[in-house]
Image: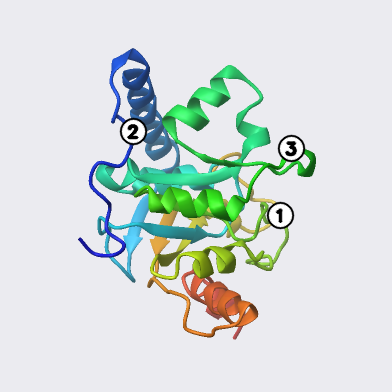
Amino acid sequence: MGKSSYPQGSDGVGAGGGLWSFAARATAMLIVFLARLVTGVQANWIGTRPDPCRRVYFANHTSHGDFVLIWTVLPPALRDRTRPVSGADYWQTSALRRFIGTDVFRAVLIERNRGAVRGDPIGQMAATLDAGDSLILFPEGTRNMSDEPLLPFKSGLFRLATARPEIEMVPVWIDNISRVMPKGELLPIPILCGVTFGTPLTLSPDEEKSEFLDRARDALLALAPHYGEDNV
């Protein structure tokens, strides 16, 4: 087994039985169907392949539905083992959200309310990787509502790469057509989306935080359609 391969026997969606597990899996299938129907999302694997190994997929963030698009385009076997990192405050406000966040997406819930924080978020993510799952992470830390293609990255991606340097970090650009439409032509919902997976990177020995985050940000920007044209 490779050092970043999925361990045998670790938990995953469908590992248990019963009606609850069936409901979670049926809901997951419905979400995938609706996401494809509404967005027409397509995967472009240009820098890597959908290999069955543990990874951190890090992406640009403009919508609450961004992680759903990445999750949707993964092959089913990888989707079952890939968990978004998300705010606990969002997913714990109702029984329906708890079911979808915890049982369907199996989200790694991070406390954003400083008064409620217990433990180390990086430790939570590292433990998830150790258990055999992959992560979806948004290193900007919040949705980008600015005109800039990316906000500055928070330090979490570097801290996670430092904690688990053997894990591949895969840049993923989510292209929503509404982001490239001229002003005044904004669509009410995205109707065509693309998810592009770039070349994985890992932390180099002795690489400083700013150097690594700049390299990761550049790798993500390189996948953005029209980015180079805008900077000519």
At numbered mark 2, what does the secondary structure look like: helix, strand or loop?
loop
Do residues under tags 1 and 3 come within 8 Å of each other at their CB atoms? no
Residue 230, above or below 86: below
Image depth: mark 1 or mark 3 in front? 3
For disc 2, the marked residue is 13
Specify which label sits upstream in the sequence, 2 or 3: 2
For disc 3, the marked residue is 116
**Residue type at numbered disc 2:** Val
Residue 129 makes an appearance in the image = yes
Q: Residue furthest right?
A: 115
Residue 177, above or below 37: below
Do residues under tags 2 and 3 come within 8 Å of each other at their CB atoms? no
Specify which label sits upstream in the sequence, 1 or 3: 3
Residue 13, above or below 114: above
Image depth: mark 2 or mark 3 in front? 3
Q: Residue 170: which quarter of the image?
A: bottom left
**Residue type at numbered disc 1:** Met
Specify which label sits upstream in the sequence, 2 or 1: 2
Residue 31 percent location from the top left of the image: 41, 31
